[in-house]
Image (cartoon, rainbow, N blue to C red):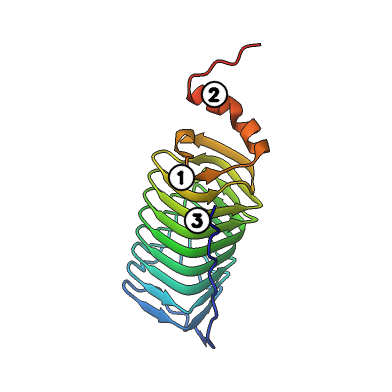
Amino acid sequence: MKAARRPEVRLPPLEPHDGGPLEPDGDYDGLDIRAADFSGQDGVGARFMDCALTDCVLDGTSLPRARLLDTVLGGVRGVGTDLAEAGLRDVELTDARLGGTQLHGAVLERVHVRGGKIDYLNLRRARLKDVVFESCVLVEPDFGGARLERVEFVDCALKGADFSAAELADVDLRGAMPLEIARGLDRLSGAAISTAQLLDLAPALAAEVGLRVLP
């Protein structure tokens, strides 16, 4: 089991954000963005590099195909944030409160999600490499058709996860408590679980293969 490589984000001295709205294909470099409300704004294709976004509101924010590079997001919150086909590399996300975030088709590399709660995270057909979910709650995350390589769940609640048609390599699920898999039990090849988790999943695994357990 190969361990995930965590991001090492070292931000340079940052300039305060001018408070302006997001712009399509906007270029945001070396900015300290605090308590900004980007609800409903369109930032399709925007690029954030060496930025810190703190306590920002992302309700319905449109950021498909955006790129987040060497960037830290702290305490962001929002429902329906659209990051479809976005690229995240060397990103730290802490204490987020998000719901219905769209990351389908996205590419995540060296991303650390720590703390907070994310409901209905859509990662269908996404590619995750060197991603760590730590001390957070994921409710009904959708990894359908995604490719996960060197992904770790550390002290993380994973509820109702969907791994349908996913491909896993060096995925460490041992730190997921609870570990609840709604679909895709047959796709767990390439993952590691603990003995206790195996016992918890035994009834679902038996049903998956059509095995009857009789007294």
Determine whether the residue tagged by mark 1 lies in a helix, strand or loop. loop
Question: Would you call the spot at circle 1 few (<14 residues within 10 Å), some (14-19), or many (20 or more)?
Answer: many
Cα distance in 3D space between marks 3 and 2: 27 Å
Camera-side residue: 107 or 39?
107
Residue labelled with disc 2? 206
Residue at the image point whose x is 59% and y is 16% from the top: 213
Q: Quadrant of residue 21?
A: bottom left
In contact (CB < 8 Å): disc 2 and disc 1:
no
Determine whether the residue tagged by mark 3 lies in a helix, strand or loop. strand
The quarter in which the C terminus is drawn is top right
Mark whose residue sits in front, 2 or 1: 2
Cα distance in 3D space between marks 3 and 1: 18 Å
Determine whether the residue tagged by mark 2 lies in a helix, strand or loop. helix
> In the image as oriented, which residue stretches furthest toward the front?
1
Q: Pinpoint residue 67: horizontal percent, then vertical percent.
A: 38, 69
Mark whose residue sits in front, 3 or 1: 3
Residue labelled with disc 3? 150
Question: Which badge, 3 or 2, comes first in the chain's sequence?
Answer: 3
Q: Pinpoint residue 189: horizontal percent, then vertical percent.
A: 47, 40
Q: Please name the amino acid that badge 1 sits on.
A: Asp
Q: Please name the amino acid that badge 3 sits on.
A: Arg
Question: Which badge, 2 or 1, comes first in the chain's sequence?
Answer: 1
Cα distance in 3D space between marks 2 and 1: 23 Å
Residue labelled with disc 1? 142
In contact (CB < 8 Å): disc 3 and disc 2:
no
Task: Indicate whether 167 appears above or below 98.
Answer: above
Q: Pinpoint residue 57: horizontal percent, then vertical percent.
A: 52, 65
Question: Which badge, 3 or 1, comes first in the chain's sequence?
Answer: 1
Q: Please name the amino acid that badge 2 sits on.
A: Ala
